[in-house]
Image (cartoon, grey):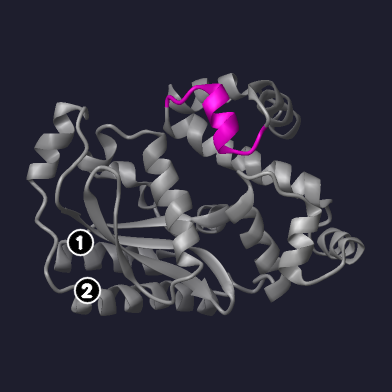
Amino acid sequence: MERHPGPEAGFRAFEQQLGLPVTVIDNAHFFNRRAVFDPMRCSHRKHPACRAGFDERCIRHCRYAMNSRCLAEEGPFTAVCWKGLAQIVTPLRYGNVHYGMLYAGLWRNGETASGLPGDFYRSRELLPELPESMAALFALCRLAADGVMMHLLKTRLLETVPDERSARIAAFLREHAAAAVGLEDLARELGLSRSRTSFVVKQLFGKSFSRLLQAERVERARHYLAGSAEKLHDIARECGFSDEFHLSRVFRQLTGITPSEFRRRHRS
């Protein structure tokens, strides 16, 4: 697949000039499918302090908790993870559609968790402390995020941008997939009747709400399976399945393999 060099080359220059590592967390694999960045651009595990002791708490924070916060934030903000590492998080948004998050920098901030591998503490000590003023870095991160979205627009990669209603439905699924939600909850979110909501979902996505919800839960499970050693019954709870047997059945229906086989392939 052809790689579009714009954002990737820009981020490399950004990192070299400012000494700030950049990571892009990609909602729904929009950037990965279009080969916008090098594969490791979308992974925090290229950073030694993030890689050491990486587990389900990292996924929960960087992919899901920060995604929820980005839905309410207009611009960059500072976030501190459970390890005591700080980063600048900037929403990647075009119009009313939230595509992902741009993470910049990596600082040590205050106390950190105990019981992590020795490599983590050694790597953490090499990190700078969080600067007192972040205003200039916020401005640069906002400019970088806007540049990414403008590049996608200019290279016509945003021609398939979803309309506002489909974006709201996708955001609802990402936000609530782990909870016990149904079509009625989405109908309240959209201000529509249950029957009208069912029709709109099928019209926009070609699938029923229940199938969309299953697909979102399986996608979430894939991240935990590939990125953590968490047990299946815990992953099932994190992803909205009733138990590990429910997870295994739906996962196999949608992917053709069991969760255990998926984990072996992606952690070998």
Question: Residue visible at 42% across and 30% down?
Answer: 228
- Tell me the crowding category of disc 1: few under 14, some 14 to 19, or many 20 or more residues within 10 angstroms, Cα based: some
Count of all numbered marks drawn on residues in the image: 2
Q: Is residue 2 above or below residue 224?
A: below
State which region is magenta.
229-241
Query: Which residue in the structure is indicated by mark 2?
Result: 137
Image quadrant where residue 104 sits: bottom left
Q: Position of residue 253 (x, y in %)?
A: 76, 30
Q: Position of residue 64 (x, y in %)?
A: 48, 51
Task: Report the front residue among 180 and 27.
Answer: 180
Is residue 3 something that shows in the picture? no
Residue 70's disc is none
Question: Residue visible at 92% across and 62% down?
Answer: 195
- Tell me the crowding category of disc 2: few under 14, some 14 to 19, or many 20 or more residues within 10 angstroms, Cα based: some
Query: Which residue in the structure is indicated by mark 1?
Result: 20
Task: Report the front residue among 9 and 192.
Answer: 192
Q: Is residue 49 above or below residue 36?
A: above
Residue type highlighted by circle 1:
Leu
Q: Position of residue 184 (x, y in %)?
A: 80, 57
Q: Are marks 2 and 1 in contact (CB under 8 Å)?
A: yes
Which callout, 2 or 1, points at the residue further toward the start of the chain?
Answer: 1
Question: Residue visible at 50% across and 72% down?
Answer: 93
- What is the distance, in whole Å, between disc 2 and disc 1 at their CAs? 10 Å
Task: Report the front residue among 65 and 118.
Answer: 65
Residue type highlighted by circle 2:
Leu
Q: Is residue 79 left or right of residue 256?
A: left
Is residue 72 something that shows in the picture? yes
Image quadrant where residue 4 sits: bottom left
